């Protein structure tokens, strides 16, 4: 029995085949009605989303409801939302009153008139203009618990069927359809389960919100497995244990398709932690505590593998590595913006009532619904520091769906990428933020930053302390990318003013015409110029001068390369360089723009191939 259980655990946490993942994700894409995209796997990146057709900048790629999602515990005192779709509920008055009354109970500053807040909460007092911001009424949980509210009976039913039936501690659960047909009475939730659920929620609130999401996954998997057994019970020579395992594997498919790693093994080590073994042991102990509490209210002996620690750790790890922040804009923000835009006389009159409320809310007046969600298709989109798509909601997006919009034109066959972080951050901060996702970025933007610094190093090394140079390298370039940038063959290509017809990068032959090489130099010039700012910070004026000199050198090489060719594109490049004069920074900008205008496709292939080679070094 122990051997069979261990084998089941390993089956649940192992990566499933590409064919199984593709089959499931094709169903997701069909369900969403998303045309023109597919999920592919590569050795370098794993799953990725690719275009099957051309798309325009600004085009909506897809909207996707979360497979599982939850509002952050701390955000529940700021926003009353549907526990299924995360729309704001009730009224603007209710939202303001709830926020400020919760602040009062938490010891925060509050509007003196508590009676007004209670009247607003009960919607006995209406604020001027609030009728323009109609919100769905509150619908209580089917099981009559006090923890969840919904925007409609449909959302209440959807949550009940997907997970909440097992996580609800309401006084009386309605009978299931077959029991209701026989006249059964509502089921009373045992006091022991109520206490166990309360203990689990308290622990998750105090430690990690993701445990709430993991509980939803476990509950949903149990309900789905139970449904499979009801539709397809054991047949022929199949034992009850075999039928249970078949049902569990079927119910596990949506989770199996997600990228998973055991939480305490995969999470990035914080910089201020020095004992890694102790850190990871503490995380494992935290997960074990959470699972123990969850087993106290959900354990089902038919599906023991689902309650093993490594399986629970893989669920939590999936959320840590794949989650997207979920944000839903607040109607309260729109309400106060409307008040601010009223004609002067109307605004003065309205602010007699709304002014004290806005003062009390202060900077938190626009607090959105904030949470975490897992989206099956969105989680397949890889990161880039220079993405061609983004998660961006419009005014019409008032729920927890992921909305993916294209930032740039995308051609057939192109990979679609988003940024998991703020891509405007400096390199070091970007890489630090990405550590929690378990990888080091090697996208085009990162690669060219590496090239810029490698070009800068020879000029600064002679006049700066080696420790200072190493610090600049650490700050601006991740070690794997820096080591790849030091590849002598790639460096020779960039520094060769003779415009070699071809070169070999890690065994790959890359053809480079004079026009292609000119474009490479143009980009190198821009990156060296950008690196000047970092050099100025790290080394002062001498470093800046050296970097500027590198930009000038490579700008001139781009100019010379352009003059060697009679093509219209390179004529434009030469004209741009000449117009920029001798200023290195202007040369860098002008040559880069002209190279882009010339459409240097071969140079792009060169950079992509070199980047791929660098990633595998």
Image (cartoon, helix red, strand yellow):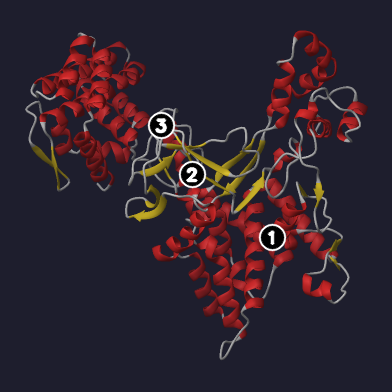
Residue 457 can be seen, yes or no? no
Distance from label 2 to label 1 (Cα)?
Answer: 28 Å
Is disc 3 placed on a helix, strand or loop?
helix
Residue linked to disc 1: 163
Marked residue nearer the N-terminal end (3 or 1) = 1
Q: Which mark is residue 428?
A: 3
Residue linked to disc 2: 436
Marked residue nearer the N-terminal end (2 or 1) = 1
Do callouts 3 and 1 mark residues in contact (Cβ within 8 Å)?
A: no
Distance from label 3 to label 1 (Cα)?
Answer: 41 Å
User: Which quarter of the figure has residue 549?
Assistant: top left
**Residue drawn at the location 13% of the way across and 35% of the way down:** 512
Residue 145 vertical position relative to residue 456 in the rendered view, above or below:
below
Do callouts 3 and 2 mark residues in contact (Cβ within 8 Å)?
A: no
Q: Residues within 10 Å of mark 3 (few under 14, many from 20)?
A: some
Distance from label 3 to label 2 (Cα)?
Answer: 14 Å
**Residue drawn at the location 57% of the way across and 76% of the way down:** 245
**Residue drawn at the location 28% of the way across and 45% of the way down:** 615
**Residue drawn at the location 20% of the way across and 27% of the way down:** 519
Is disc 2 placed on a helix, strand or loop?
helix
Is disc 1 placed on a helix, strand or loop?
helix
Q: Which mark is residue 544?
A: none
Q: Image check: 388 left or right of 3?
A: left
Residue 523 x %, y %: 25, 26
């Amino acid at each position: 029995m122990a051997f069979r259980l261990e084998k089941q655990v390993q089956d649940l946490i192992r990566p499933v085949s590409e064919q199984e993942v593709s089959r499931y994700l094709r169903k997701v894409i069909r369900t969403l009605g998303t045309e023109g995209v597919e999920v592919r796997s590569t050795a370098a990146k794993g799953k990725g989303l690719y275009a099957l057709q051309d798309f325009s900048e600004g085009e909506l790629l897809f909207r996707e409801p979360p497979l599982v999602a939850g509002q952050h515990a701390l955000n529940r005192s700021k926003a009353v939302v549907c526990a299924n779709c995360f729309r704001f509920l009730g009224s603007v008055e209710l939202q303001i009153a709830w926020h400020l009354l919760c602040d009062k109970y938490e010891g925060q500053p509050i509007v003196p008139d508590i009676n007004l807040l209670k009247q607003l909460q009960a919607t006995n007092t209406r604020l001027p203009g609030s009728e323009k911001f109609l919100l769905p009424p509150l619908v209580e949980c089917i099981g009559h618990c006090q923890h969840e509210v919904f925007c409609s009976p449909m959302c209440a039913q959807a949550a009940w069927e997907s997970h909440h039936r097992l996580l609800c501690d309401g006084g009386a659960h309605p009978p299931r359809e077959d029991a209701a047909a026989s006249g059964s009475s509502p089921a009373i939730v045992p006091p022991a389960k109520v206490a166990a659920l309360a203990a689990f929620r308290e622990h998750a609130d105090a430690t990690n919100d993701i445990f709430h999401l993991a509980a939803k996954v476990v509950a949903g998997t149990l309900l789905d497995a139970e449904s499979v057994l009801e539709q397809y019970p054991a047949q022929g020579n199949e034992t009850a244990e075999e039928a249970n395992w078949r049902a569990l594997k079927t119910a596990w498919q949506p989770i199996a398709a997600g990228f998973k790693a055991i939480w305490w093994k995969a999470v990035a080590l914080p910089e201020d932690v020095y004992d890694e073994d102790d850190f990871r042991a503490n995380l494992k102990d935290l997960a074990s505590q959470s699972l123990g509490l969850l087993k106290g209210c959900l354990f089902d002996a038919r599906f023991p593998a689902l309650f093993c620690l490594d399986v629970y750790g893989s669920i939590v790890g999936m959320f840590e590595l794949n989650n997207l922040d979920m944000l839903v804009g607040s109607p309260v923000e729109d309400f106060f913006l409307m008040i601010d835009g009223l004609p002067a006389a109307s605004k003065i009159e309205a602010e007699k009532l709304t002014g004290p409320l806005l003062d009390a809310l202060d900077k938190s007046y626009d607090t959105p619904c904030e949470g975490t969600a897992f989206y099956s298709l969105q989680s397949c989109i890889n990161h880039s520091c220079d993405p061609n798509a983004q998660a961006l909601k419009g005014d019409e997006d008032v729920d927890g769906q992921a909305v993916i919009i294209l930032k740039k034109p995308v051609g057939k066959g192109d990979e679609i990428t988003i940024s998991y972080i703020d891509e405007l951050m400096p390199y070091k901060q970007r890489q630090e933020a990405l550590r929690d996702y378990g990888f080091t970025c090697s996208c085009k933007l990162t690669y060219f930053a590496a090239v810029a610094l490698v070009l800068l190093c020879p000029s600064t090394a002679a006049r700066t302390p080696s420790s200072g140079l190493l610090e600049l390298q650490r700050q601006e370039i991740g070690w794997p990318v820096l080591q790849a940038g030091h590849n002598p063959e790639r460096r020779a290509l960039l520094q060769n003013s003779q415009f070699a017809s071809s070169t070999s990068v890690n065994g790959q032959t890359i053809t480079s015409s004079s026009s292609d090489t000119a474009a490479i130099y143009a980009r190198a010039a821009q990156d060296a110029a950008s690196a000047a700012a970092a050099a100025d910070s790290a080394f002062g004026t001498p470093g800046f001068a050296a970097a500027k000199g590198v930009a000038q050198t490579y700008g001139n090489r781009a100019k010379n390369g352009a003059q060697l060719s009679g093509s219209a594109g390179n004529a434009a490049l030469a004209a741009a360089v000449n117009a920029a004069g001798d200023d290195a920074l202007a040369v860098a900008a002008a040559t880069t723009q002209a190279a882009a205008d010339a459409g240097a496709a071969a140079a792009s292939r060169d950079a992509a191939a070199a980047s791929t080679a660098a990633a595998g070094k």
